[in-house]
Amino acid sequence: NGVWQYNGASWLQHSQLSNLSVHLLEETMDEKIWVGTLTDGIWGYDGKNWSQPVKLKNTEILSMLATKDGKLWVGTFANGLWQFDGTSWLQQERPSGGKTGDTGISALLETKNSQVLAGTWGEGLWSFNGSQWIHENAPIRGNIVAKIYQTKAGEIWVHYRDVLTPDGRPTITLNWGIDRLDNDTWYQVFYRSFLSAFLESSTGNIWVGMSKWVSATSEWGLWLYNGTDWESQEELKGK
């Protein structure tokens, strides 16, 4: 149903994008609004007009990230990873499986030390050191990254899946889970679990909404991690 803007009193639908399937929004340092769509690429709004980069027209956008240096990173399903510096668009040769654009760029994150991480469908986790992309030696099952988060303490949390369809998309299996990276060591947090929401509170607690496979049943709920133990919130069990 397109893009809507709230001006403090009412909601306004932007007619130029009214028929698009929008699922991503970012704002760059120049206050430009960027919209990622499922079928019609990326659009930018400068406060008056919408424009679309020709290179990403009719492209399925999987991820977007506006970094502190003013750049915009855009991950696609079949057209690789792109970087916009405010003037020109540059396609990245990697992450990939060998040929540019041969893997979906499913998740993007800027870490506390300004490093950019990219999660892929089938080629695992990658990091950008400012000049080149490095394939991280992360024991992620299936090398399929769905989401990436970072805590205030600097831990990297990764939600993964394990099997791709023939056309390169994650399929439904039981072997989904959550891993975390702490001081160069990876730990398994949950196995056979589907992560739907992640939040670190102001007190440092981790809240996770997920579906956990228990005794041949998929059980939805909310979990709390206090730094030592996990506790299921019984009031929201099954929701």
Image (cartoon, rainbow, N blue to C red):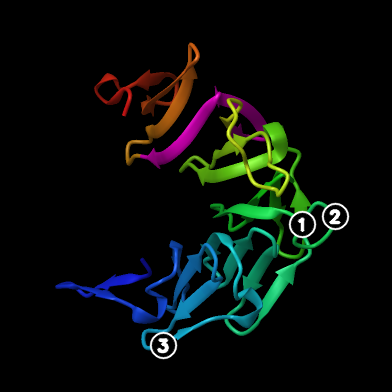
Query: Left or right: 104 with respect to 111?
Result: right
Sequence-first disc among 3 and 1: 3
Q: In the rendered image, which residue does mark 2 sit on?
A: 98
Query: Left or right: 3 with respect to 175?
Result: left
Q: Is residue 224 above or below residue 2?
A: above
Q: CA distance from mark 3 to mark 1?
A: 33 Å
190 is within the stretch colored magenta: yes
Q: Which residue lies at the image location 85% right of the left edge and 55% below the top edge?
A: 98
- Quarter of the image that includes the N terminus: bottom left
Q: Residue furthest top?
A: 215
Q: Is residue 138 above or below residue 6?
A: above
Q: Is residue 121 above or below residue 179?
A: below
Query: Left or right: 101 with respect to 177?
Result: right
Q: Which residue lies at the image location 66% right of the left edge and 68% below the top edge?
A: 82
Of discs 2 and 1, which sits in the foreground?
1
Label 1 near label 2: C-beta < 8 Å?
yes
Nearest the camera: 183 or 213? 213
- Where are the magenta residues, as a range? 180-200
Q: CA distance from mark 2 to mark 1?
A: 7 Å
Measured as percent of width and height from the top left, residue 208 is found at: 41, 33
Q: In the rendered image, which residue does mark 3 sit on?
A: 49
Q: CA distance from mark 3 to mark 2?
A: 38 Å
Give the residue type at disc 2.
Gly
Dot label at residue 102: 1
